[in-house]
Image (spheres, grey):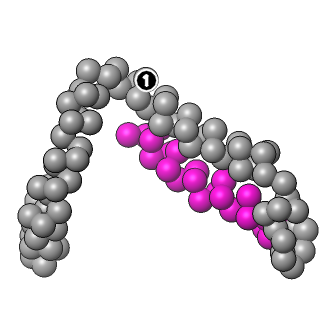
Amino acid sequence: MEVTGLAGRMSEAINNIFGPPLMRVFQPMNAFLAGTYMPWARVVAVGFFVGTMVWVFAGLKRAYVNLEAPSKHIWHDLRFWTVVSMLPHVIVYLYF
């Protein structure tokens, strides 16, 4: 699917500006990881997200994270919102 119009021109401009320096950075990583078995890469990526979510929710003390929370309800707990905000990333990694 080719993007046309303003979006296509913007995409092309961004690729022309940022593409060359990013390729110098990411090309060695891409070459190194080219032989990585894809399911293992997915498992490691999801593991990082899930591990971070568990650490945030179970490892951080509620009193430390919510110093000035208006109440003790779950929706005022920043640890809960950290987990909620990371779930879409996990879903994307699992889906793609």
Relative to 92, is 47 on the left or the right? right
**In the figure, residue 79 lies in which quadrant?**
bottom right
Query: Is residue 3 in view?
Result: no
User: Quadrant of the image for the N terminus?
Assistant: bottom left
Relative to 44, is 25 on the left or the right? left
Residue 27 picture location, percent across and down? 18, 40
Residue at numbered disc 1:
40
Q: Which residues are magenta?
A: 74-96
**In the figure, residue 8 lies in which quadrant?**
bottom left
Is residue 85 rendered magenta in the image?
yes
Residue drawn at (85%, 59%) of the image? 62
The amino acid type of the residue labelled 1 equals Trp
Query: Is residue 44 in view?
Result: yes
Residue 47 picture location, percent across and down? 56, 34
Residue drawn at (84%, 71%) of the image? 67
Residue 38 picture location, percent across and down? 35, 25
